[in-house]
Amino acid sequence: MELKTAEQIETMAEGGKRLAAVLEQLRRDVQPGVTTLSLDRVARDLIVKGGDVPNFLGYRPAGARKAYPYTLCASVNNVVVHGQPSKYVLKEGDVIKLDLGLRHHGLNLDSAITVGVGSISKLAKKLLTVTEQALYAGIEQAELGRTLGDVGWAIERTVVKNKFSVVEGLTGHGIGRALHEEPTVFNFGERKTGLRLMEGLVIAIEPMVAIGKGDIMQLPDEGYGTVDGSLAAQFEHTVAITANGPRILTKMV
């Protein structure tokens, strides 16, 4: 686990603004009739045009059979994360998770949004709202002196009170020179337990939530889907722990 300097955090904030802008463009591009592969091309082109490096492309996490061949993770409906872009054509009512990262001046950023395709069901809208609320509940706890258990507790509490399920087998992570660093950031926990948050720690907080049960299975493309086939959502920000409170690095302003 490496604590970041103030200068490194500023560099990451600049990269985070760029990443947020790319995700916002992808959000606008999500429409019925669009393929997930076309979204991947847009993501890659925008990141490279900005002078940065797509950090998912060619990345091989521990346990993976091969390196990831795309810039974007595009996970549709019951696929929670790591869905590979393809010729799949988005249709009205789908829910797609757009998980994206870039490397800016040697430092990594990671962020995700979930977008409804056209008109989606009332339950799907609630899922997206609750998952994003859970993200910000976790971020609010990311203050000096609090713990990772506090962050996970806030996320879990938001999810459970809305009668959804945390996908417990997937987590957030530390981030910086490497895309995935220590510590592991769970989306559940007990207050005042776990690692105490320190100034300079930068973490990716990313609640993943399912309408049904939170059990997952690995898919043939190495993505992860819900066992019961229920819809899932994901929202993520890269967050720095500072003396002035949590600082979201992956936003445009």
Image: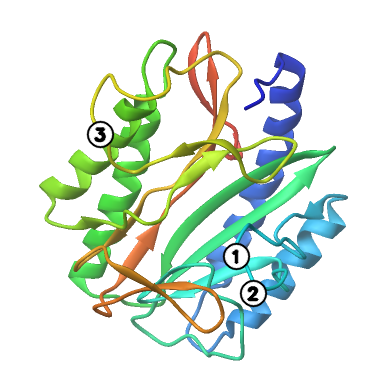
Percent from the top left, x then y, of residue 96? 45, 71
Q: From mark 1 to mark 2, how far is it between C-alphas?
A: 7 Å
- Find residue 37 and report its image quarter: bottom right
Identify the residue at image location x=75%, y=36%: 177
- Callout 2: few (<14), some (14-19), or many (20+) C-alpha neighbours within 10 Å? many
Lower sequence index among marks 3 and 2 = 2
Marks 1 and 2 in Cβ contact (< 8 Å): yes
Relative to the observer, which residue lies in front, 8 or 28? 8
Q: Split into 4 quadrants, where in the image is the C terminus?
A: top right
What amino acid type should be assigned to the residue bearing mark 3? Trp
Q: How many marks?
A: 3
- The tag on residue 153 is 3
Identify the residue at image location x=27%, y=19%: 192
Lower sequence index among marks 1 and 3 = 1
On the image, numbered disc 2 is attached to which residue? 39
Lower sequence index among marks 1 and 2 = 1
On the image, numbered disc 1 is attached to which residue? 26
Whether 163 is drawn above or below 7: the answer is: below
